[in-house]
Image (cartoon, rainbow, N blue to C red):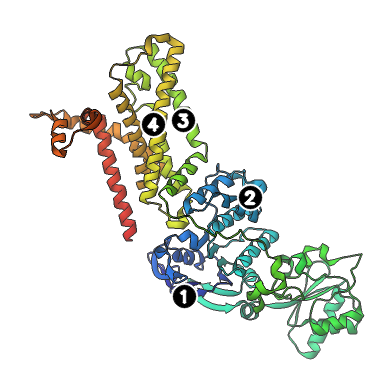
Amino acid sequence: MIQAIGLTSNPRKELPPAVDDVSFEARPGRVTALLGAPGAGKTTTLRLMLELQRGRGITYFRGRPLHRIAHPSREVGVLLSEVPGHPARTIRGQLGMVCAAVGVPIRRVDEVIEVVGLVSLRDERLGTLSRGMDRRLGLACALLSDPHTLVLDDPAGGLSVTEGRWLHGILRAHAAHGGTVLFSTDDPKEAARTADRVITLEGGRLVADQEAADFARTRLRPRVAVRSPHAARLGALLAKEARAAQRSVEIVREDGNRLSVYGSTCADIGETAFRHGILVHRLADETGDMGPRATLPAEGLASATVVTSALLASASATSTPATSTPATDEPATDEPATAVAATGAHTPDEPGPATEARTRSAALPGARNLPQLPPPIAVRQAPSPLRPLRYELRRATGVGTGYLTAITVLVTSALLSVLLARIGHTPQPRLLAAWPRECPLPPAALGAGLLGALAFGEEFRHPALATDRGTVPRRLGLLAAKLLVASVTALALAVLTVGCDLEILYLVYGRELVGVPADWLPLSASWIGLTVGCAWAGVLAAGIFRSTTAGLAAVLAVPVVVVPLVQKTLAGPSVRKAAGFSERLRELLLMQWPFGGARYIAAGARLVAQPVGGALMLSLTALLCAYLLTTLRSRVR
């Protein structure tokens, strides 16, 4: 059950708030529509409910606000706009990444893909999907964690009639299984056709909260849809009788042989046609102009066929669509525009959606015709620190950006090393790292920094976690997973770069340039520390500034801005030195370093004392403190 109390958005300068004191309830087992014209505040209301936008008021989901729910994605499935996925990621990859984020088994992907009808498109990229397929994928993401509540913003917008009917069938099936469904729409006919309760917003305020039947009766215009080969004659007779009886009846001639009669009933029209011997192919109650735009499933639609004048009398007595033996010359079901509307067209097999019987759809015979839902998740995984790591691994390996960056770095490093060896006057460590003196960083360090910046930059550009924890996924577990994956990626890139450079130098110039330096251990530590440090700087800066460009700029700022400052500081006069640092550190800890640990501690201290190492360490410390500060600030808010 959803209980929204006093939802009010923050004022926009001199303008009134987009949403002002909106309160309503959405009960389980029912489909609730949030209706309003564009700009009425529907999307703002949903974002306030999901705590994605600042404002006043509170929303309870089964008695708890969203920030008090340990796993919000297991309680609420959300579809607010387009699927926030990388265009190059496949459908299966996107759902697998979300599975890791919400903590459900990977086999759930195949179950949901089968339900939403994307089995044949599981390997298609998100950038190639149509509007309908994108909506199916969004619904799959919402159903992935088996939530109790579904919150959707204009889910059928831009869809065809068939796709919209299928989508609302899924929502109806979810409600029939005891779930709560809330969706927004700007089409009053869609709300009356598919919902059990309609909540109307106007100008950011709640103006009506009605059952769908009351909404259709009081806010939509009922009519009678008529189709006859003698439509013009029948329309003239109806207008003549209305004038004689001094009744207000409006007759609209539709395309072909159809009439829309406002202010009359099926019984009156049927009696008029019977008295004058006019053949009628179709006679049905409808609401507004929904008839030509919506159709019922075949199993819930009474066959609309040609009738004789004798049978028309009994049809008009019951005020239902007339039926008879199927016609062979002009079957009504061949024309989509003449199908019965889903609201107000009552048939023996399926009641109108505006009736109270729709709330008991699970008990109706037509309930077996509802779409199948994914099987419920019987056993849920316990919280695990590996969940963010699985998510980050699937995110990083799901697109080709990382692989393309690594290949570019290796090719560039190999070419630079060959050119530097040909020119000469380059020390062997810089030759193996392909690091010219004119460049602030080697290609491997720049590549590691770019991959680190992409790790968080893509989270803000394609926020797969936005509906779970808000628009800024700044969580320490996610940060640790990104730093770990970035470290492993940078380490692999550093090793592969040196290996490829050694191999290409051996192939071009022989053994002269591939000897192992005597001080290979500190050089290796410095090289690995540089690449990993650049990757971490990219991750932290992109997480703070919410941009891949900002993350890469922070990586470049270390050698361009911070290193000269550190060099200037260290170049000043010094009267003391840190000789014997490792021995004093051992005395402080009162323990013997195993495996010659004092030597490694001293080597690490010497690396930090270098201008580049000190600048990188200083930058990482500042970025980490800034990240922690923004995380705590967002939690306080």
Q: Which residue is mark 1?
A: 23
Residue 155: x and y, percent?
59, 61
Tell me if label 3 and label 4 are in contact, CB under 8 Å: no
Viewer-nearest of labels 2 and 4? Answer: 4
Secondary structure of residue under mark 1: strand
Nearer to us: label 1 or label 3: 3
Which residue lies at the image location 43% right of the left edge and 13% below the top edge? Answer: 506
Q: Is residue 80 left or right of residue 603?
A: right
Residue 362 pos. (x, y %) = 65, 72
- For the residues carrying marks 4 and 1, which lies nearer the camera in this image? 4
Q: Earlier in the sequence, mark 1 or mark 3?
A: 1
Do the numbered discs 2 and 4 sit on residues whose CB atoms are within 8 Å? Answer: no
Residue 130's label in the rendered image is 2
Task: Give me the residue at 40% from left, 9% from top.
Answer: 511
Mark 1 is on which residue type? Ser
Is 162 placed above or below 543 here?
below
Report, in whole angstroms, how far the alpha carbon at label 2 lies from the one at label 3: 32 Å
